[in-house]
Amino acid sequence: MDFALFFTYLAACGAAAATGAMFQPGDWYKSLAKPWWTPKDWVFPVAWTILYICMSWAAMRVAILAGSDARVGQALALWSVQIALNTLWTPVFFGLRRIGAGLVIIAMLWLAVAGTMMAFWQVDPVAGYLFAPYLLWVTIAGALNRSVYWRNPAGSAAS
Amino acid sequence: MDFALFFTYLAACGAAAATGAMFQPGDWYKSLAKPWWTPKDWVFPVAWTILYICMSWAAMRVAILAGSDARVGQALALWSVQIALNTLWTPVFFGLRRIGAGLVIIAMLWLAVAGTMMAFWQVDPVAGYLFAPYLLWVTIAGALNRSVYWRNPAGSAAS
């Protein structure tokens, strides 16, 4: 059991899980013709909660095998967190047009990218340097998200 | 240089990049008040292409360090692919209401989950078993997506 690894992988799952909370099925999904064996709505969050725990536990077990230097497994786990958060931001900002939620996500992405860069740098400085342009860009993108948030008080979720 | 690792991590980036292609800024973004230093629109895809290559290269270098058994690094890279695709599906299906695109993504997710499960199983059977419920669920969810696609020819992208 390696709590840091488990919760890092669970954080990546958290980014995926956030899509379920933010993009609701709603009336459109209700109106779709579906087969008789469609699971009830309540089954989905229950199933996903179990699955996210299982897949994080599995990844933790494999990352432990990365082994001689435990920081390698942890660094790769952080990479997974940043790519999931990266995938989440665009649909929330441009899809839902939720500028404030986008700001929260990009702040978490910034932390994940900075954390990955430091973890990479510790085990392989070149890998850390390769992350520097990414951290710079997310800093710019985050500042832009924040500026847009301030300048458009009524812009969020506008249609 | 490990091509399998590099392209596996690049595949995870591909899922993140797909959000940029599918959730376009459009008139809403144009209409927002933005600071003078906002980068031109063309800069974003150029920057992201470079960043995705850099971050995949960096992850490849670190995954190589996972080392004694090269399959460990490859297995963790596949885990990153599945979490990014997992994060992508919900916004495309429930956000864009693109049932067909969702079907393509869930097919890729199924392959990524099956690949991760096999890779995990090879280095740690318990980790492979922990992925079995996930593969089963994605099989059900994929079948549901396909059934909904067939039953709702006009349902895609309906408002």
Image: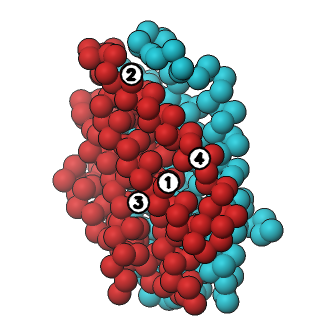
Chain colours: A red, B cyan
**Residue behind mark 4:** A134
**Badge 2 or badge 4: first in the primary sequence:** 4
What residue sits right under mark 1 in the picture? A113
Q: Amino acid at mark 4?
A: Tyr
Mark 4 or mark 3, earlier in chain:
3
- Which of marks 1 and 4 precedes in the sequence? 1
Residue situated in front as seen by the camera: A58 or A10: A10
Circle 3/circle 2 CB separation < 8 Å: no
**Residue drawn 39% across the image and 67% down it:** A8
| Helix, strand or loop at mark 3 | helix
Q: For the residues marked 2 and 4, what is the alpha-carbon distance in whole angstroms?
A: 21 Å
Q: Are marks 2 and 4 in contact (CB under 8 Å)?
A: no
Mark 3 — residue? A12
Q: Amino acid at mark 2?
A: Val
Precedes in sequence: disc 3 or disc 2: 3
The Cα atoms of the two marked residues, 4 and 1, are separated by 7 Å
Crowding at mark 4 (Cα within 10 Å: few <14, some 14-19, many 20+): many
Q: Quadrant of residue B134?
A: bottom left
| Callouts 2 and 1 on one subunit | yes
Total numbered badges shown on the rendered structure: 4
| A24 shown above or below B116 | above
> Residue A14, image x and y in percent?
33, 57
Q: Mark 1 and mark 4 in contact (Cβ < 8 Å)?
A: yes
Q: Residue sitting at 32 percent across and 28 percent down?
A: A98
- Mark 3: which amino acid? Ala
